[in-house]
Image (cartoon, rainbow, N blue to C red):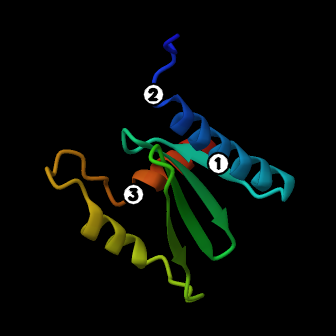
Amino acid sequence: MKSTLPESLPKTLAFLNKLTGFLNDLDRECISYSLKHHRDESITVEVALPGERWEIEFLLDGSVEIEKFISSGEIYGEASLEELFHRYADQAGSRKPSKNAGAAVLERDLA
């Protein structure tokens, strides 16, 4: 008798077991995380810790890719905000934030 289950089912179940096991471990240790979906074949778990951010991707093929972003501990001043917009503004130039957009919202909310 031929099975009607898809051939990929065992691989999918292994993927889900690995992912949910990891999420249960994070929950047990009270480590905050969020789930993201950037690629068709994976689910990303983003973990933010003091001075660190981890992106852990669980791929359908069973592999896990981890990227760590670890702070040097250097603290920057407000002037660095201009660098953020200068370096990472929308390449099409369609929505450039004004320098005082945040201040205007804050003033409105405080009124």
Q: Residue at x 64, y 48 (%)?
A: 18
Q: Residues within 10 Å of mark 2 (few under 14, many from 20)?
A: few
Asked whether disc 3 touches disc 1, contact meaning CB atoms under 8 Å apart, the reply is no
Q: Position of residue 3 (x, y in %)?
A: 52, 15
Observer-nearest of 10 and 46? 10
Q: Is residue 85 above or below residue 79?
A: above
Q: Is residue 111 visible?
A: no
Indicate the secondary structure of the residue bearing disc 3.
loop
Q: Residues within 10 Å of mark 1 (few under 14, many from 20)?
A: some
* Distance between the alpha carbons at the discs numbered 3 and 1: 46 Å
* Distance between the alpha carbons at the discs numbered 2 and 1: 19 Å
Q: Marks 3 and 2: which is nearer the front?
A: 2
Residue occupied by mark 1: 18
Q: Marks 3 and 1: which is nearer the front?
A: 1
Q: Which mark is residue 100?
A: 3
Placement of the C terminus among the 4 image quadrants: top right
Indicate the secondary structure of the residue bearing disc 2.
loop
Asked whether disc 3 touches disc 2, contact meaning CB atoms under 8 Å apart, the reply is no
Indicate the secondary structure of the residue bearing disc 1.
helix
Left or right: 96 with respect to 16?
A: left
Q: Position of residue 87 (x, y in %)?
A: 26, 70
Mark earlier in primary sequence (3, 2)? 2
Residue occupied by mark 2: 7
